[in-house]
Image (cartoon, grey):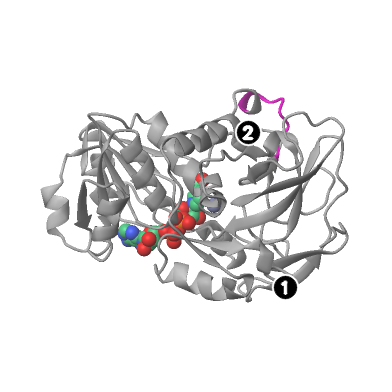
Amino acid sequence: MTYDRTRVAAWAAPASGAPLAPLTIERREVGANDVLIAIEYAGICHSDIHTVRGDWGPQPFPVVPGHEIVGIVAEVGADVTTHQVGDRVGVGCFVSSCRECVNCRKGDEQFCLNGGVGTYAATDRDGTTTQGGYSTHVVVDAHFVLSVPSGIDPAAAAPLLCAGITTYSPLKRWGAGPGKKVAIVGLGGLGHMGVKIAHAMGAEVTVLSQSLKKQEDALRLGADHYHATSDPTTFQALAGQFDLILSTVSASLDVNAYLRLLAVDGAYVNVGAPPQPFSVEAMALIYGRHSFAGSMIGGIAETQEMLDFCAEHRLGADIEVIDADRVNEAYERVLASDVRYRFVIDAATIG
Ligand SMILES: NC(=O)c1ccc[n+]([C@@H]2O[C@H](COP(=O)([O-])OP(=O)(O)OC[C@H]3O[C@@H](n4cnc5c(N)ncnc54)[C@H](O)[C@@H]3O)[C@@H](O)[C@H]2O)c1
Ligand SMILES: [Zn+2]
């Protein structure tokens, strides 16, 4: 199929809460620093669903979601030295940043002080609205394009671009490793990567999930222990146990109940992004010198480090590859916690 930048096939949400449908979009010309990627796979992140369902406020519809992108370089601009035609590459949650502010210079481009640009539903530097990975092609500044190591299956690599880095970054920052007790709350797309990565880092991993339904899966993914949070004795039995609790839950939680599971100096790090606020009791924090923290994806260098770590440890996501016309059904199944553990769209079925 020849590429026509003015007629690129995609799947988009036409309005808040409306089902996704095919849409033809335009990509920019390949600039001197740009890479044209022929997309192979795009993961479905719960953030895509929050965005198009209006959980995070108004959006510039139509929105083409997708920020877990893997594909093959089809063309590079004249000044690109980091990627070549034919390379397998990935794109995560952002496609531009100023690269000059203190955060960008530290490698925290996701916190750019001059307006980083999200992969979709964001205003790009040229004033256009970005459109994401549920599409056949995308044009991205080479600095924001990752190399996907050959050891990982490309479809299983796609979710690493968001779910992988979102769990890797806080696990590393808060010291998951040998001798540390780490709990992962919520066993969805992020959670199952959290289990795999924390296990590969050498931590003792406990999964805290609503029911016992996913217990066998969790142990296979690398968890050492598993408890159902619907059982009130869980919160008594595990009081004061964990050095780190990573919550990946997409809904609001009783944070205080989890803070009480922390050991002295333990940290509860939330990466879930529900629209409702959390309520934190002073006593749940001060008793035990606990920390309550958050984390958002990771910078470009750290994302590359995560991909290399996953290749070295032979980690990819557990995926269900779907045709694009099943995206609405997949959204419903994610909302019903019926995914093991990430849906990935086969871009060959788009358009
Ligand atoms: N911080 C970041 O950078 C970042 C990046 C990606 C996604 N997110 C957010 O993280 C959240 C999770 O994303 P995902 O793609 O993994 O979603 P997901 O739907 O695949 O997983 C969420 C899991 O939480 C479980 N859950 C819901 N309520 C629970 C409860 N009370 N107790 C225990 N488990 C519960 C669900 O059953 C599901 O397994 C979303 O809010 C998403 O927007 C944040
Ligand atoms: Zn995401």
Amino acid type, mark 1: Pro
Give the left or right position of residue 211, taking residue 14 as reference: left
User: Mark 2 highlights which residue?
Assistant: 109
| Span highlighted in magenta in the image | 96-103
Mark sitting earlier along the chain (1/2): 1
Residue at position x 61%, y 61% in the image: 57
Number of callouts: 2
Does residue 93 lie above or below 210 as drawn? Answer: above
Quadrant of the rendered image containing residue 268: top left
Which quarter of the rendering shows the N terminus? bottom right
Does the magenta-highlighted stretch encompass residue 157?
Answer: no
Asked whether the viewer can see residue 253, the reply is yes
Main SS type for the magenta part? loop
Q: Which residue is mark 1?
A: 22
In space, the residues marked 1 and 2 are separated at their CA atoms by 32 Å
**Image x and y of residue 107, in percent:** 60, 27
Ligand 1 sits in quadrant: bottom left
Q: Position of residue 316 (x, y in %)?
A: 46, 48
Q: What kind of residue is marked 2?
A: Glu
